[in-house]
Image: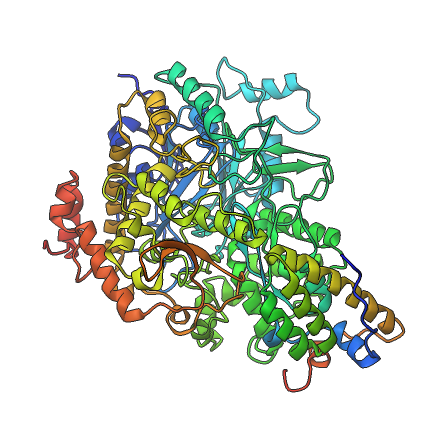
């Protein structure tokens, strides 16, 4: 799979990508753990999305890849990543294949955001992390 | 006459008098074992069946084994069922059940007992030691306050099995209660932790490191009776009527129904046919580990790892903190470690983590909206550390000790929502507690009808994966884009062959599509499910993770072991007990037990008007992607052809569900106006004495 090549995020976007969004803006996403079940969960940051999509030997990520694109665009505010996700999902052969492709994208984007944001002070509070009008 | 499979005696612990009494099992033989045995004992021993909270001293708790416990019946040898009135449900707590595995039930039978009936309330903290026939009530002052692991360790020390003692010394100590016999085994201990001692709603019973009777709040019930622990060691054995037949059936099961170790089919579809696999929700932290299982299980769903944490925990308790931990974890490895250590925390406190399945998300919401931690619900918990192990410990400590938000949550979460003015969360689904004040399991009533309808007709989240294996098999294949091992039409044909006696061959009962969701067929399926599980799963004590086996791609004709002549549930039962029971007769016994349970609920105050889901099930659609992106289930399309169909995105229609209940009650032979049992139905099952008690309470249903 070729490495995605998008430009690093601007500092303001990088900061947003490293923060946690408000509970109301979370993206519900469970896991399927055969043979016993679905585990409810959600995604509230790019890093938790990265952990959610990380391939595991015993369970399958349960994020709705269609809604994920909208969430990345509207809640995280990252149109570049959202477009890349849409393209990757469109080219995927299955849900799992789509998750793997998106995982690669998210890994790159997270690394970019961390690199850009390395010099910035960490921000963890929900009030500060939520985009305008969502808290 | 020898009662093969049974120990022959039931132990009655009169906590008020501090006395142990013996009851012959023979009197209750017709109820099979496990739950059926427990319901019959509850019926006889509980003198006030109107109680609505399990902490009432009149409550009776029964811990019951099956004839299969202590034998090599596959995935049936080590389960145990606990019954009694529960704690913390809404609008009241029902007579309910909870199961657990391990070695307690086996050891109880080796000690000579088929069940324990616990009545009354001890004057002070007590633990009970059972060593074969010797039963001793001990002062538990030194144990009270200890967590479940420390309490078990202390009991092992007091009974001569402390770590570091020589085997000979341990044997000598143990022999004091064992007559002329010896055992190398440590006693099996079932106990409560701080959550149970403080009688909190989700206090549970814990045995060894990771076996818990979670739902029902039985830890709180034990706490209310001042009962800290029961320890049992036995040196007897269980008589098996036909050992050769038992061994043969076990070999057949392994050779025919379970995938080969040499050439494993990891994509096989079945309930029975997989290989041992630790059922932790995050991957085991290391490959330096070995399987661990309940007695005689072919599954080995637990693991013990060299890292020393998370050992023996599986399933729900290894899921409760994943979402929270993902807020702060920096890597999958860190997420896994926090998650598995959080599993240890709930095991030690003896708190049922199932309540966090959806409840933790709700608490997080309330905190972010400043309901918790604001003026309305003060909280000094370190919410800024949400997702860390430190927060997990402090949260569980608070809930187990009735401190902080635990004060309000201790008597039930929906009750707390009412107190905090957040009942709207039950309408919009922010608080996904769908039935009887308990959390949705994930198999949402709006999608998986057998699970939802079964739970609201029962007394708890049923947690029975009988039909749910369809969801898992189909959706995993769908997620990978793999060909289906069984097409929808083929799958429903195979399942329907097993639905004997009264819906055998009826594929329509499995159609959960919009057009069929309130049908007589679905009512029949739910009915079959309630009867099957009441006997085979909760009384014979076949493990939920392995049985029933409807279809099985390891076999040439794809038929599963359930009800089969070579390795069906009844084959093992008969080999152990010497009965000549047919599969259908087992189903009939399940129906009888289900009717007895409904009689108890009726005396407790249940009426059909109470049998409804939380408002969000009717008012808020089960949105696509809420838990999983799709929920594929076999349904018939407009042309009547079977296909796997996504059943998400819908609500239940309250009026139609109400009409569906009328169909269901009619099929059961219950009064359709009230949902109460009728004399005709009860008398037909030789249960006129139950009808008499209902009539005396003016709660006997009218015959149709």
Above or below — where is B319 with respect to B293? below
Q: Quadrant of the C terminus of chain B?
A: bottom left
Q: How is the image coloured?
A: rainbow
Q: Left or right: A116 with respect to B462? A: right
Q: Is residue B460 in view?
A: no
Viewer-proximal residue among B493 and B189:
B493
Tell me the quarter of the picture where residue B453 sits. bottom left
Give the x, y percent position of residue B328.
73, 63
Viewer-proximal residue among A21 and B4:
A21
Instruction: Name the residue at 40% across, 47% down.
Output: B467
Instruction: Name the residue at 50% across, 38% down.
Output: B190
Above or below — where is B135 with respect to A95? above
Give the x, y percent position of residue B86.
39, 53
Give the residue at the far bottom of this rendering.
A133
Tell me the quarter of the picture where residue B293 sits. top right
Instruction: Name the residue at 46% across, 56% down.
Output: B632
């Amino acid at each position: 799979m070729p490495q995605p090549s998008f430009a690093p995020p601007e500092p303001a976007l990088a900061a947003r990508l490293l923060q946690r969004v408000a509970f109301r803006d979370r993206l519900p996403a469970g896991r399927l753990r055969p043979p016993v079940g679905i585990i409810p969960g959600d995604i509230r940051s790019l890093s938790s999305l990265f952990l959610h999509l990380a391939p595991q030997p015993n369970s399958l990520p349960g994020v709705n890849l269609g809604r994920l694109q909208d969430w990345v665009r509207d809640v995280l505010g990252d149109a570049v990543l959202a477009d890349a996700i849409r393209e990757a999902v469109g080219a995927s052969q299955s849900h799992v294949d789509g998750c793997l492709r998106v995982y690669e994208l998210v890994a790159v984007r997270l690394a970019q955001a961390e690199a850009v944001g390395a010099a910035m002070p960490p921000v963890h509070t929900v009030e500060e992390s939520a985009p305008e009008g969502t808290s | 006459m020898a009662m093969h499979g049974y120990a022959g005696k039931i132990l009655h612990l009169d906590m008020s008098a501090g006395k142990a009494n013996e009851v012959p099992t023979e009197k209750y033989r017709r109820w099979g074992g496990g739950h059926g045995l427990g319901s019959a004992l509850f019926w006889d021993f509980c003198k006030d069946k109107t109680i609505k909270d399990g902490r009432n001293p009149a409550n009776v708790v029964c811990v019951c084994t099956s004839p299969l416990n202590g034998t090599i019946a596959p995935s049936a040898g080590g389960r145990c069922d606990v019954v009694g009135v529960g704690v913390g449900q809404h609008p009241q707590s029902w007579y309910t059940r909870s199961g657990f595995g391990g070695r307690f039930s086996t050891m109880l039978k080796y000690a000579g007992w088929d069940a324990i009936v616990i009545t009354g309330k001890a004057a002070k903290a007590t633990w009970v030691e059972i060593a074969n026939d010797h039963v001793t009530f001990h002062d538990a002052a030194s144990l009270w306050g200890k967590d479940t692991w420390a309490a078990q360790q202390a009991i092992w020390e007091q009974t001569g099995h402390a770590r570091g003692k020589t085997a000979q010394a341990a044997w000598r100590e143990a022999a004091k209660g064992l007559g002329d016999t010896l055992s190398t085994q440590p006693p099996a201990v079932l106990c409560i932790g701080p959550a149970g001692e403080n009688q909190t709603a989700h206090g549970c019973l814990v045995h060894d490191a990771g076996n818990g009777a979670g739902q029902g709040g039985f830890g709180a019930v034990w706490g209310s009776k001042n009962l800290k622990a029961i320890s049992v060691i036995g040196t007897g054995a269980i008589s098996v009527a036909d050992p050769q037949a038992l061994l043969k059936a076990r070999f057949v099961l392994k050779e025919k129904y379970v995938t080969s170790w040499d050439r494993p089919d990891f994509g096989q579809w079945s309930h029975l046919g997989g290989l041992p696999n630790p059922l932790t929700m995050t991957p085991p932290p290391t490959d330096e580990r070995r399987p661990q299982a309940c007695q005689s299980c072919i599954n080995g769903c637990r693991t013990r790892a060299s890292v020393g944490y998370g050992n023996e925990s599986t399933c729900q308790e290894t899921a409760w903190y994943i979402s929270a931990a993902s807020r702060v974890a920096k890597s999958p490895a860190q997420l896994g470690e926090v998650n598995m250590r959080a599993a240890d925390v709930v095991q030690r406190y003896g708190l049922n983590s199932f309540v966090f399945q959806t409840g933790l998300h709700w608490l997080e919401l309330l905190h972010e909206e400043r309901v918790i931690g604001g003026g309305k619900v003060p909280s000094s918990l370190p919410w800024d550390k949400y997702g860390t192990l430190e927060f997990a410990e402090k949260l569980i400590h608070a809930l187990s000790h009735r401190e902080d938000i635990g004060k309000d949550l201790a008597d039930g979460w929906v009750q707390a929502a009412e107190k905090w003015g957040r009942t709207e969360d039950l309408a919009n689904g922010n608080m996904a507690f769908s039935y009887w004040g308990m959390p949705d399991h994930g198999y949402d009533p709006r999608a998986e009808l057998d699970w939802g309808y079964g739970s609201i007709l029962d007394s708890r989240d049923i947690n029975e994966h009988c039909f749910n294996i369809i969801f898992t098999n189909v959706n995993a294949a769908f997620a990978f884009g793999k060909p289906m091992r069984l097409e929808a039409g083929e799958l429903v044909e195979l399942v329907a062959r097993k639905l004997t006696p009264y819906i055998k061959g009826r594929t329509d009962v499995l159609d959960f599509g919009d057009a069929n969701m309130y049908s007589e067929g679905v009512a029949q399926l739910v009915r079959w499910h309630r009867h099957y599980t009441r006997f085979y799963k909760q009384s014979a004590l076949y493990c939920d993770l392995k049985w029933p086996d409807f279809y099985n791609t390891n076999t040439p004709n794809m038929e599963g072991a359930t009800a089969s002549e070579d390795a069906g549930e009844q084959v093992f039962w008969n080999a152990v007990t010497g009965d000549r029971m047919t599969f259908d007769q087992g189903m009939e016994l399940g129906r009888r037990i289900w009717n007895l349970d409904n009689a108890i609920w009726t005396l407790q105050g249940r009426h059909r008007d109470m049998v409804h889901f939380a408002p969000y099930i009717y008012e808020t659609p089960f949105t696509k992607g809420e838990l999983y992106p799709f929920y594929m289930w076999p349904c018939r399309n407009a042309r009547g052809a079977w296909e796997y169909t996504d059943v998400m995105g819908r609500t239940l229609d309250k009026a139609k569900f109400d009409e569906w209940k009328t169909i269901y009650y009619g099929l059961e032979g219950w009064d359709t106006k009230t949902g109460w049992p009728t004399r005709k139905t009860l008398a037909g099952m030789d249960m006129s004495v139950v009808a008499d008690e209902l009539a005396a309470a003016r709660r006997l249903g009218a015959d149709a």
